[in-house]
Amino acid sequence: AGMVALAFWLAIFFAVLSYRQKQNSLLNRLQNALQSGELISFYQPIINVDSGEMYGAEALIRWVKKDGSIISPGYFIDELESSSLITPVTLCLIRQVLDNLSGILNQDPELKISVNIVPEHLEHPHLLDALESMAAQGEQVQSLSLEITERQPIYDIASAKIQIARIKALGLTLKLDDAGTGYGGISYLQEFDFDYIKIDKMFVDTLHFDKASSALDAQILMAGHLNLPLIAEGVETKKQALELLQRGVHLQQGYLFAKPMPLDDFICFYQEATKP
Ligand code: C2E
Ligand code: CA
Ligand code: CA
Ligand code: CA
């Protein structure tokens, strides 16, 4: 009888434990964070190093907790991207960009703000439905640029082409992010109508050494053939910036210029950068 009672209480103990774990799962906490407005867009400037002007910025998600602590996407982005929560989160970020920056984008319609999307958004119409209805309400969606990584494959190529055509019809641009690190590579560039290629930090890091990676040079050569401008990310040193500039890569993003920052700091940075 003792054994039966023990088994009974153990079963209850584990049931409660697993229930609590579910309640506290990362995805659950992210859902709550979205609802309570804790998923916030930070902004990292992208500079045209040739002219010294600002080309635009990348919107990067941060989880800003009630106590003020800031959690980087490295901790939660995989979980988010592999759940359906990624769509409301992406829309929430786009909403923030348009609300936060409407003043600046009105006054400076050339400025482009990048938002990161996932293959899901090219395979299903939800994101484009939302963007089209925002455009119909007179929102400046044409100031947005969508970045898609090669991290996960695009399975449904036919649907992706349809969504990309809708992206272009709205006047948005499309960037291949983290080029050369994932699945698609050259085939993506041939298949889909990208406007820019982003060089991943991994390749920029090779410019620390005197002999730069041939992988970087191959990317630059390929972009030249396709007539696509490049944007380098993760530029941390003047040496890297100059080496990239010498290779014709004018658009650069990285700690050398600015780290991702909250809205208020970004607006100050923008005003400082555009002072006559
Ligand atoms: P990513 O799209 O490749 O973004 C560039 C990352 O490099 C950012 O990391 C940025 O803060 C970091 N970075 C930029 N310049 C430098 C530099 O000079 N040095 C160093 N060490 N790092 C630099 P972050 O913000 O932590 O984002 C990581 C990744 O999370 C992003 O990589 C992107 O793939 C993903 N991510 C961020 N925000 C979103 C989002 O809203 N939606 C989705 N789907 N993914 C996002
Ligand atoms: Ca990106
Ligand atoms: Ca990138
Ligand atoms: Ca990257």
Image: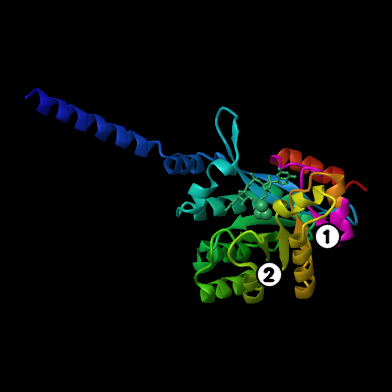
Judge whether 248 appears above or below 78 on screen. below
Q: Find residue 73 and name its label.
A: none
Q: Residue furthest left?
A: 1
Secondary structure under the numbered disc 1 in the rendered image: loop
Residue 10's spot in the image, x, y percent?
A: 21, 29
Please identify the quadrant where the N terminus is shown. Answer: top left
Residue 179's spot in the image, x, y percent?
A: 67, 61
Q: Toward which corner of the image does residue 200 lie, by quadrant?
A: bottom right
Question: Is residue 140 in view?
Answer: no
Q: Residue furthest top?
A: 2
Q: Residue furthest front?
A: 211
Q: Residue at x 55, y 67 (%)?
A: 122
Counting labels gives 2
Q: Residue at x 55, y 71 (%)?
A: 160
Residue 24's spot in the image, x, y percent?
A: 40, 36
Residue 182's spot in the image, x, y percent?
A: 60, 61
Q: Would residue 250 be counted in the magenta stretch?
A: yes
Lateral position of residue 224 relative to residue 190, left or right: right
Q: Nearer the viewer, mark 1 or mark 2?
A: 1
The residue carrying mark 2 is 194
Which of these two is toward me, 63 or 245?
Answer: 245
Which secondary structure class fits the magenta region best? loop
Which of these two is toward me, 100 or 157?
Answer: 157
The residue carrying mark 1 is 249
Secondary structure under the numbered disc 2 in the rendered image: loop
Under mark 2, the amino acid is Phe
Marks 1 and 2, how far apart in space? 17 Å
Lateral position of residue 268 relative to residue 183, left or right: right
Under mark 1, the amino acid is Val
Instruction: Write down the region rendered in magenta.
Output: 242-262
Q: Residue at x 56, y 27 (%)?
A: 67
Lateral position of residue 124 relative to residue 10, left or right: right
